[in-house]
Amino acid sequence: FRGIVDICCEIPTAEFFGNALPVTWRWLGIIKYMTEKHRKLISMTVMLFVSTSSFASSESHGDPFAPVFEAFALILTCALLGRFVANRLKQSLVLGELLIGILLGSVLMALDRPAVHIIRNLDVVKEVIVKIEDEEISLNEAVDRTLTASTIPEKAKGHLSEILKSGHAAGYANLVRYIQLFSTIGIALLLFMVGLEGSIEDLLKQGPQGIVIALIGIGVTIGLAYGVLAFLLPDTTDSRLALFGAATICSTSVGITARVLKDMNKLSTPEAKVTLGAAVFDDIFGLILLAVLAASLGQGALEPSVIGWILLKIGIFLVAVVIFGLKVLPHLTPFVEKLDPRSIRLLFPFILLLLFCYLANLFGLAMIIGAYFAGLMIKDSMFTKDSLDDHRNTIHSLFTPIEGIFVPVFFVLMGVQVDVTLFADGQVLLTGLILSLVAIAGKLGAGVFLPKGLNKMAVGWGMVPRGEVVLIFASIGKSMGVIDDQFYAVTVMVILVTVVITPLMLKRTFGK
């Protein structure tokens, strides 16, 4: 293994290896406690880091999906390694997947892999495609116009221009889109599985409580963050960055919270149910806030009609979901079951999951909200018992293996998108650290009005992690010119700090 590390350090095109891998070697001092079998596994992974080509090579393939399979295999192998290290260090699996994703992204960037440049600048690539389609201009002209107006660093502009103007740009873009599809399926499956642990009746029962927790967490976080940003950035010509930046870090990641609680086998606890219900409302309010801010900043004024239309659409979706889950689905399931009694417990819930993801997106919500509600409404009791049924044929047991394949892709890919070089900026580190403290403090008090008997600190820490909604906020802010690369790095730092600290504190809190 050390020989492989030394060889990696000699690669002339990868300056990153010179410092990072020896540090990584020392960080993985746990290697001496591993068996020969484990050492071989890690050695294979390092060789994959160095030799992988589909994440970036310009080689042609007979089948256009072959590079996707190779990249998928690499991501899952890295996820296995990250989970193994996390287990040995007694940490959350999601933390291991995120950290191995950061390492993978750094190594592939050091090797100048084109697909990683596209992953990290996907919003710019989308703008290029829109310009080609809407303005009917050539690829080179669209690339030049988009990159000239973009705020990404000059070095990144040069790399991206070279990649997009090459003859392989379409292949790289398709590879990234397919891997992102696997990632989206993973996070949707995770939220669906979380929904299976509860029911619509439970959500309605906890609704007022969840709404209060979500509103307190969002309100306190935005107030504190706005004040901090206004103080740290006094020379800003307007308050757009402070306002949008404060809103960016306000939303809890229900996916990460769910994964951490699941890793701890705490999903069935009252605190977990309260936390997840509140986290769903937190995401809903966060996305409403995003839609309102994006519309108002884009138009230059806060239009009441825009806000009213957004709220109306979301209200219609939520009411329709509740009515369908309580009144329609229980009567529909027996008829659907007759189509294929052997496979219906897998196929029908999966169809429902896909449809509700689509409908949530149609109504202006994140798809994962639709996935969560699909899990809430479907239950084993809706299907009839027959001779094929046993404990292995429950909906939960049927979906668990599928979830185990796709969910790690989301968390590894989140790590790949982190550009660690931006953390070399002292201003980024200071702002990121202060906003991380604000993001934590704003959620810890969210459960202040919970009744006695519930662990308020467990609910508070469960609301701390930030993730996909923060990235959505930040990417939209970048595309609108409100957020620059430095503040994007700050948001990534907030995500990392909150995701790292949450499993540690939840384990300690639940332990008490």
Image (cartoon, rainbow, N blue to C red):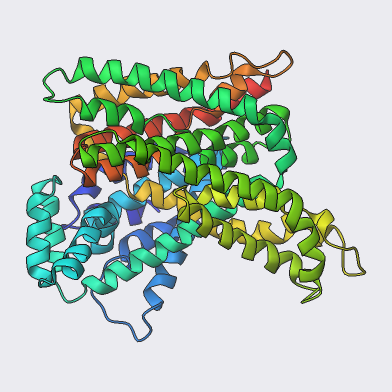
From the viewer's perspective, is residue 210 above or below residue 151? above
- Is residue 407 at least partly visible in the picture? no
Residue 85 in the image: x percent, y percent?
A: 51, 43
Q: Please tell me which residue is depicted at 54% across the width and 34% down the height of the picture.
A: 281
Percent from the top left, x then y, of residue 388? 88, 69
Classify the position of the C terminus by image quarter.
Answer: top right
Q: Nearer the viewer, residue 503 or 440?
A: 440
**Which x, y percent locates residue 150?**
13, 49
Q: Residue furthest right?
A: 387
Vertical arrangement, residue 166 with respect to residue 218, above or below: below
| Residue depicted at x 21% and y 55% | 124
Q: Say which residue appears at 53% left-offset and 59% top-offset.
A: 406
Q: Where, by quadrant of the figure, is residue 141 drawn?
A: bottom left
Report the front residue among 251 and 397: 251
Q: Quadrant of the N terminus?
A: bottom left
Quadrant of the rendered structure where residue 71 is? bottom left
Q: Is residue 447 visible?
A: yes
Residue depicted at x 34% and y 68%: 175
Answer with left or right where residue 251 lies relative to residue 104: right
Residue situated furthest bottom in the rendering: 62
To which quarter of the image does residue 496 belong? top left
